[in-house]
Amino acid sequence: MPIENVSDTARWVAMYRAMETARPDALFRDPYAERLAGPKGREIVDGLKNGRRMAWPMIVRTAVLDEMILDRVRNAGVDTVINLAAGLDARAWRLDLPPALNWFDVDLPAITAYKQEIMRDEVPRCRYEAVAVDLTSGAARDEVLRRVAGVARSALVVTEGLLIYLTHEQVASLARALHVQASIRWWLSDIASPMLLKFMEKTWGDAARTGNAPFQFAIADRAGFFQPLGWREIAFRSGLDESRRLGREMPMAWLNNLMIALQPKRRREAIRAMNGYMLLERA
């Protein structure tokens, strides 16, 4: 199977960024993506069922999170970004960020060392630090959060592509740990519903489990889950809506849109919320 461990998912996503960058009408440019993905990233995409046809949700996610991160930095006073499970993300190099911004990429030691080697001659746009830690270790995670949040006045945490690989208990633990740090004001993440989890399990579940990266976390009631943990949702962007806005809809989108339009209103809303991007604020 092409996915051998959870860090391989970072190569998978980097390959999608490389594919988008090669388009003449690219939504974003990531000149580092192909190097970061490497041959393994191409192997994963080509080895997965519908690997290339299913690039669109990853491309949309990248573009939308780019927009939301820049909005917080430019318009909400964010001076520190804490990018948890950063994988092979290159935003600290490719986004138009203020030089005084603090950016922390936090991930497992092996993938962190790999990215540092690939990017060793590149200059980030802001104050950058890579932090190697296993985020499933609560004590190690909390120590890192204390340190990096300690330099911030107003911090944004990003968990792109992380939550779906955690259990409900692990996500709740992370939510509480983030809330303890008073400087962490915002939390940005993609989020899946049980409906999407069922689809992903059917499409890629075997490959993900073989690589010890099973899909786990999905919720229908976001407010009911996060609000008791100290986080209030202030924005949600539907993946389907954003794909239409950005011109990166799924193959045969016209047929899918027709089928959705024929559904009852409650079903339409559930489909619209299958996946999306939520911005949480500490309550």
Image (spheres, rainbow, N blue to C red):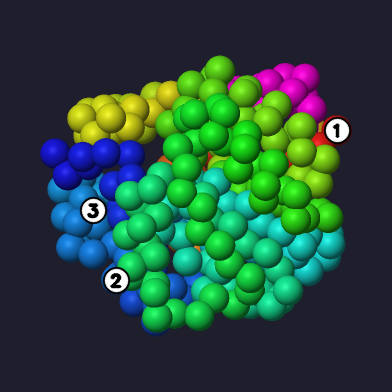
Which kind of residue does numbered mark 3 sit on? Val
Q: Identify the disc placed on residue 283.
A: 1
Q: Residue 35 carries which label?
A: 2
Element type at marker 3? helix
Q: Which amino acid does label 2 sit on?
A: Arg
In this image, 121 relative to 141: left or right? left
Where residue 136 sits: x, y (%)? 47, 30
Q: Which residue is found at the position 23% from the left and 53% from the top?
A: 45
Q: In the rendered structure, does residue 227 fall within the stretch colored magenta?
A: yes
Reply above or below: 82 against 162: below
Asked where in the image residue 102 lies, by quadrant, the reply is bottom right
Is residue 72 within the magenta segment? no
Q: Give the range drawn in magenta.
A: 218-231
Q: How crowded is mark 2: few (under 14 residues within 10 Å), some or many (20 or more)?
A: some
How many numbered circles are shown?
Answer: 3
Q: Name the residue under label 3.
A: 45
Q: Which of 58 and 105 is in front in this view?
A: 105
